[in-house]
Amino acid sequence: MLTLNLINEKDFDEYFKQAIIGYAKEKVASSNWTKEEALERAEKEFTYLLPNGEKTENHYIYSILKGNQKVGVIWLGQASPQRKTEGYIYDFVIFDEFQGKGYGKEAMREIDQKAKEIGMNRMELHVFGHNKIARLLYEKIGYEITNIIMAKSI
């Protein structure tokens, strides 16, 4: 069984650094940003969304634990101030060495429960088009495509 624990300041600092790197890589892989600008833009976005770090109001960043072992991180926030009952998964990662064990599906069930406890009744997330494994997981647990953005180089 997995548990979700809110991260502390020390864990947040490590998470913040790693998340920015991961997000920048995904934005480059999806051809949204150039490699040269990616880290700076990622840091700006994360700083904007989390101005008070792990204490930012209506944002909840959890360590995903299997016993005492940290297997991932998930960040739940309010979709927007106007949509207080809608949750948004801003980030979700199961570390590479723990993938393929069902932890992703279980963590998503746990985050749904946390969202309900704080008054949310709908969940949204973004998935990069090239991340087929994540898309399959989200579809299996009931997420449906609501928008598709397409692009091509010319």
Image: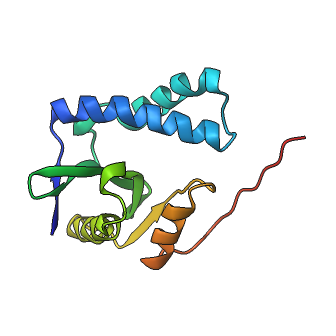
* Left or right of 7, for residue 89: right
* Left or right of 3, for residue 148: right
x%, y% of residue 75?
A: 33, 50
Residue at x 40% of width, y 71% of height: 122
Q: Residue furthest left?
A: 68
Q: Residue furthest right?
A: 154
Q: Is residue 51 above or below residue 144?
A: above
* Left or right of 111, for residue 78: right
x%, y% of residue 69?
A: 14, 51
Q: Is residue 67 above or below residue 36?
A: below
Q: Is residue 1 above or below residue 17?
A: below
Q: Quadrant of the N terminus?
A: bottom left
Quarter of the image for residue 10 reads top left
Q: Is residue 142 visible?
A: no
Residue at x 41% of width, y 58% of height: 88
x%, y% of residue 58?
A: 29, 49
Residue at x 31% of width, y 69% of height: 102
Quarter of the image for residue 26 reads top right
x%, y% of residue 94?
A: 34, 54
